[in-house]
Image (cartoon, coloured by chain):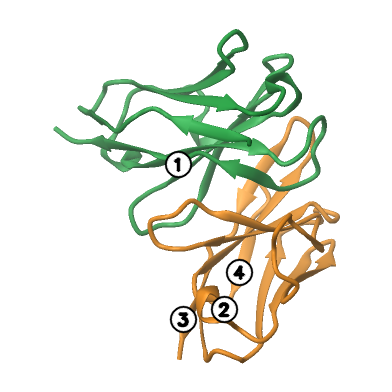
Amino acid sequence: QVQLVQSGAEVKKPGASVKVACKTSGYTFSKYGINWVRQAPGQGLEWMGWISTYKGETSYAQNLQGRVTMTTDTSTTTAYMELRSLRSDDTALYYCVRDRCSGDCSSGFDPWGQGTLVTVSS
Amino acid sequence: EIVLTQSPATLSLSPGDSATLSCWASQSVGSSVAWYQQKPGRAPRLLIYDASNRATGIPGRFSGSGSGTDFTLTISSLEPEDFAVYYCQQRNSWPPRITFGQGTRLEIK
């Protein structure tokens, strides 16, 4: 079955960087885009960006432009999200999630990874 | 950026009731709207895509409607497991620019 398994929890100091991995399996990796979504404690969902696993094209949320980089490794079918210059308000659960359909998918994310807790604290 | 506004923020109902959740977009998004259910400690679950299509395995009591700027998620005859937080999401343009609504909490009355 389709699975997205994320790397473990991280604790970082303000100003540091974090890189979260999302290992995929059960489908053809290059056919579906990958999104990253985060959720601060007790808050709603925030889309961070999308990467095409076929061409490596990216689209980032405006408020994260310049601090976030999304990449993929097709040899290991793994997606990565790196966030730099971390602040306390970056403390959140970070999810990777696949586009529901291949190509220019109209809507819907499915399935989701289990989430990676990133804590930013001095 | 397209802003999605969900209403109400909290909805208090009893099992067996029908729930109507609304989502408004600040500009037209066609039918590119999805709905998710999230329970505490769990990742969101896709319920509806393309405004009105149920995702695989989603019970028939969940239905979505709307297009343009106004969207609705209806849950008929609420089951105890339906009490959760619900989010709408839009996907617009290429490359994708995506936003979520702030969520509606459906609680037991």
Chain of the residue on which disc 3 is drawn: B
Identified at 59% across, 59% down, the residue is: B101
Looking at the picture, does residue B22 appear above or below residue A14?
below
In this rendered view, identify the residue nearer to me: A102 or A43: A102
Circle 1 residue: A114
On whether disc 1 and disc 3 are found on a single subunit, the reply is no
Residue at x 61%, y 91% (from the top left corner): B16
Q: Is A93 placed left or right of B21 in the picture?
A: left
In the image, the chain rendered in orange is B
Label 1 vs label 4: CA separation? 26 Å
Q: Which chain corresponds to the colour green?
A: A
Q: CA distance from mark 4 to mark 3?
A: 16 Å
Residue beneath the point at 75% across and 30% down? B95
Where does the image place residue B69, in percent across and percent down from the top left? Answer: 79, 63
Q: Label 1 amino acid?
A: Gln
Foreground mark, 1 or 3, reads 1
In contact (CB < 8 Å): disc 2 and disc 4 = yes
State the CA–CA distance, disc 2 to disc 1. Answer: 28 Å
Residue that mark 2 sits on: B8
Callout 4: SS? strand
Task: Identify the subunit bearing mark 4.
Answer: B
Tell me if label 1 and label 4 are in contact, CB under 8 Å. Answer: no
Q: Which numbered disc covers residue B107?
A: 3
Question: Where is the C terminus of chain B found, in terms of image quarters?
Answer: bottom left
